[in-house]
């Protein structure tokens, strides 16, 4: 359970039983549009392309492994969220999923706001011109320096995560002569992952202040009493890779109940409610995520209904999708290096990256698919495990998938849906050089985060 509570991962119990795998797809050359970015297609010569550039050219120019992000798709998804939620709601992109200055500019241009949860993310956002008042600052242990920087730069809101932080933020704001807009993050006793949610989850996690035992009401009391704070709302984030809206339904009901209690006790109706992120994407063809307009409609209805029955004005809603925007827009391109067939079991296909560019499989038993992208093949399907080049047997990129049996060293293979929590969680394990992120759009490719070099490694190692 502790692992599954991590905001970036799916429910641990999603792991397929040992030896289980789904049947091979009927056509190994087909690209399921559910898992691939919008402009990904196979050209007439059988090579896969994105943004009108084929992957062989991309590999030649940028090397492998590399992440390729479909800029048009990213913008379209951001816009779809923005449009679906409309003018009386705010969409905060969760920067931790993947953040770079280009991405910040795209978000800004498409009218989205931005969540950050560290000084580094804040600096990235500000340096790319995101207006401070459209930034929300999260985290369960923000440093004094981070809080000071956030307040003096004028961030739109700080999400308070603990009793200590209520006092800390109020004190720093006051000493800067400011009144900081804040929300209080509560844990509503709901834990949602994929197709299941638990309405009576233990609030046994590091984030937020518990609702059940009156702690949240006490936090509100304290925040309202402090001059340095302007309490604008309540925040709740219930899980990750969620497909079922029932968890949000229970969370919203509990948050609205708190809003009603606040009105009854203090005579104030807090104007905002933030329902967090966590909406699921298709990593494999088995997953069926909802569209942003369906999610927006469901959330609006839930909040409106609950507020009507509590006789409250409907607050302004915010949501914080990270994965649902960036996840499907990128794939990782690898070159096959070695192949190890184990008769009757599976074939290990080793690529030139691994757990340093995608830790999610090792960390959360996340599922991915893989395709041969440098050519088509009519060979029989072969059960494979795609593994990296790290000194670790848990270095698995794709646990169970099918590739054509004639896959060979030098072939390019790609893993789709790696836009979220792959580059942002990448490491230098074994002194791997973290791959670049290349944005592709309308026949043009542009590095937005360059590949690390050995000089980068040695620069930090002062000898
Ligand atoms: C991680 C996180 C998100 C984004 O989660 P996704 O699963 O990427 O949508 C949003 N809000 C908060 C507070 C988070 O911690």
Image: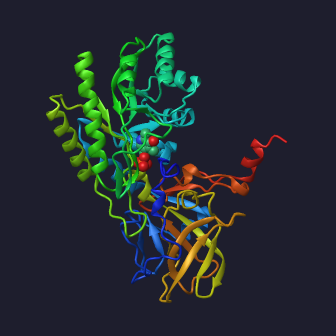
Quarter residue 267 falls in:
top left
378 lies left or right of 194: right
274 lies left or right of 2: left
Q: Nearer the viewer, residue 105 or 360?
A: 360
State the residue at coordinates (44%, 22%): 154
Instruction: Give the answer, above or below, for where 266 lies relative to 232.
Output: above
Quarter residue 349 falls in:
bottom right
Residue 48 at x, y = what percent?
Answer: 46, 73
Residue 263 at x, y = what percent?
Answer: 23, 21
Instruction: Give the answer, above or below, for where 211 lies relative to 20.
Output: above
Q: What coloring was used for the rendering? A: rainbow
24 lies left or right of 144: left
**The image quadrant in which ligand 1 is located:** top left
Looking at the rendered image, the quarter that the C terminus falls into is top right
212 lies left or right of 378: left
Residue 147 at x, y = what percent?
Answer: 52, 24
Q: Is residue 275 visible?
A: yes
Q: Nearer the viewer, residue 202 or 319?
A: 202
State the residue at coordinates (39%, 45%): 201
Residue situated furthest right in the rendering: 463
State the residue at coordinates (64%, 84%): 342
Q: Nearer the viewer, residue 198 or 320?
A: 198
Q: Is residue 105 visible?
A: no
Q: How many marks?
A: 0
Residue 294 at x, y = what percent?
Answer: 23, 53
């Amino acid at each position: 359970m502790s692992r599954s509570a991590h905001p970036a991962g799916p429910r641990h119990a999603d792991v397929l039983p040992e030896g289980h795998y789904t049947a091979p797809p009927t056509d190994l050359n087909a690209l399921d549009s559910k898992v691939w970015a919008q402009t990904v297609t196979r050209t007439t010569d059988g090579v896969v392309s994105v943004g009108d550039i084929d992957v062989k050219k991309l590999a030649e120019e940028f090397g492998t492994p590399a992440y390729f992000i479909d800029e048009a798709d990213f913008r379209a998804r951001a816009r779809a969220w923005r449009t679906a939620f409309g003018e009386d709601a705010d969409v905060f992109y969760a920067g931790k999923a993947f953040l770079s200055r280009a991405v910040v500019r795209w978000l800004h241009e498409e009218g989205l706001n931005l969540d950050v949860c560290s000084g580094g993310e804040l600096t990235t956002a500000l340096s790319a011109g995101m207006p401070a008042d459209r930034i929300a600052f999260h985290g369960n242990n923000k440093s004094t320096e981070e809080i000071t920087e956030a307040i003096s730069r004028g961030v739109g809101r700080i999400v308070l995560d603990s009793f200590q932080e209520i006092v800390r933020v109020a004190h720093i704001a006051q000493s800067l002569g400011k009144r900081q807009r804040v929300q209080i993050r509560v844990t509503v006793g709901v834990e949602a992952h994929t197709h299941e949610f638990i309405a009576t989850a233990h609030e046994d996690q590091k984030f937020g202040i518990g609702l059940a035992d009156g702690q949240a009401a006490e936090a509100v009391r304290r925040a309202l009493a402090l001059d340095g704070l302007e309490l604008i709302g309540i925040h709740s984030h219930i899980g990750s890779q969620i497909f079922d809206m029932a968890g949000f339904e229970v969370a919203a009901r509990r948050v609205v109940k708190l809003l009603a209690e606040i009105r009854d006790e203090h005579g104030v109706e807090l104007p905002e409610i933030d329902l967090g992120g966590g909406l699921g994407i298709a990593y494999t063809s088995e997953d069926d995520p909802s569209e942003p307009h369906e999610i927006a409609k469901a959330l609006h209805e839930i909040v409106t209904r609950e507020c009507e029955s509590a006789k409250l004005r409907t607050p302004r809603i915010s949501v914080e999708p990270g994965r649902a925007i960036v996840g499907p827009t990128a794939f990782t391109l690898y070159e096959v290096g070695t192949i190890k067939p184990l008769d009757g079991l599976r074939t290990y296909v080793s690529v030139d990256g691994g757990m340093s560019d995608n830790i999610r499989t090792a960390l959360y038993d996340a599922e991915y698919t893989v395709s041969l992208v440098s050519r088509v093949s009519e060979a029989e399907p072969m059960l494979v495990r795609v593994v990296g080049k790290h000194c670790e047997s848990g270095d698995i990129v794709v646990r169970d998938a099918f590739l054509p049996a004639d896959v060979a060293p030098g072939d390019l293979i790609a893993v789709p849906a790696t836009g979220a929590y792959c580059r942002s969680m990448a490491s230098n394990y074994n002194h791997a050089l973290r791959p670049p992120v290349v944005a592709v759009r309308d026949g043009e490719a542009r590095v937005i985060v360059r590949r690390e070099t050995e000089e980068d490694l040695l620069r930090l190692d002062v000898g």
